[in-house]
Image (tube, rainbow, N blue to C red):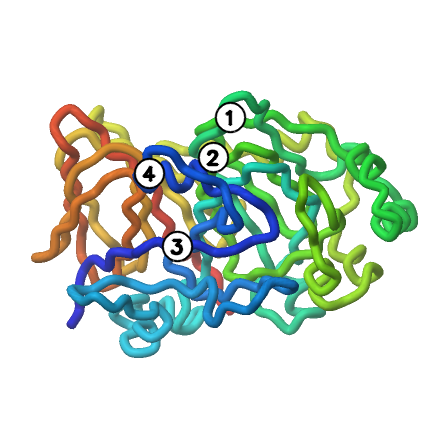
Amino acid sequence: MNPPILPLPPNRVRRAYTGGALLEEFDGAEVGEDGQQPEDWVASTVPAINPGLPEIPSEGLAHVEFNSPNPVPILSLLEQAPDYLLGAKHVARVGATLGFLVKLLDAAVPLPVQAHPTRSFARKHLHSPWGKFESYVILQTRQGIAPSLRIGFQHPPSKEEFRRMIVEQDLPAIEACFEPIPVSAGDVWVVPGGFPHAIGAGLFMVETMEPSDLVVRVEYARSGISIPPEARFMGRDVDFALKVFNYDRLSVEEATARFKVTPKVLRDDGTFREEILVGNPYTDCFRVKKYSIQEETVIPNHGEVGVFIVVGGTGKISAGSEEIAARQGTRFLIPAATEALTICPESGQELAIVAVTPGSVRI
């Protein structure tokens, strides 16, 4: 059985912070509620690392839905039909894995300052082929909150000063290293490995990253968040964590110029708009596109696996003999062997879709 469209059920994942109300409303709830599962890992082949929380076997690993009541693990499918799902060239480059991780993330509270290793650092020190470059496509912000990010040091400390702040948990001093950077719905941001950052309260986004859960966190108790020791420094110590950070000084203007992305329009004929949001030169790991479709459109697939999220509108999506209903929140995976998608919005509506496909990275 080689289906050309693989619908993806929700795959909620626990984190150390609260959120998820906007995510639930995105998925159709009339009124969403915040809780301990503020993220949905879409088509994930990456297990979630949640030290300090009760273990849930295979947490983070996604499933797909066939014409069966029992979802099938994506990892099992990739092992059984890697060339069909991923394409032989992709498998030769990175193996039987997507090579990226896509999340829907909804933070009700400010997240702690953290940093992720670069790919070179991860290879040298963590025995991992992947670091954690990440990108944000901001879908929505909560009312009554001035949305912002912290990215890069606006007032960088020395390593010795930063060590003291972390050990003593001098949160005011850590906060003084940053200035909030305003963001808005529709923005696209990138965060390369090494740069300190923290997602602000009230942001709902599509987050795409290298396929790892590697992170060092330097604030242990913020906004009711409690980070246990085993979840702070990837099982290492504070001196190891200090090596992960980039200490460059970046003003708000410099950080915005460096990390905020201006989407590039690839095609716009008045009824179909295709934009590249993230890709080269920012990363070779994945590409993020957005499609805005007002009339029936055929989108050819050039032998790539793709993860798709409908972020607005309703309609139908078909490939070969398969057709699925599409509405805000619909997630699906397109195998590399699928030749094309036909996207048909409901009359008078626009279907908006965020799509993630692999880059050219070789592991």
For this view, does 300 lie left or right of residue 23? Answer: left
Badge 1, how many Cα within 10 Å: few under 14, some, many 20+? some
In front: 238, or 158?
238
Which residue position is annotated with label 4? 29
Q: Give coordinates of residue 234: x percent, y percent.
A: 69, 64
Looking at marks 2 and 3 on the same chain, the residue that comes earlier in the sequence is marked by 3
Secondary-structure class at tag 2: strand
Which residue position is annotated with label 3? 42
At label 3, the amino acid type is Val
- Residue at the outermost bottom position: 80
- Can the viewer see residue 281 in this picture? no
Which quarter of the rendered picture does the N terminus lie within? bottom left
- Real-space Cα separation, disc 3 to disc 1, in angstroms: 23 Å
In front: 162, or 227?
227
Which residue position is annotated with label 1? 184
Looking at marks 4 and 3 on the same chain, the residue that comes earlier in the sequence is marked by 4
| Mark 4–mark 1 CB contact (< 8 Å) | no
Looking at marks 4 and 1 on the same chain, the residue that comes earlier in the sequence is marked by 4
Q: Give coordinates of residue 186: x percent, y percent.
A: 44, 29
Badge 2, how many Cα within 10 Å: few under 14, some, many 20+? many
Q: How many labels sit on residues?
A: 4
Residue at image point 25% right, 70% down:
84
At label 4, the amino acid type is Ala
- Real-space Cα separation, disc 4 to disc 3, in angstroms: 19 Å
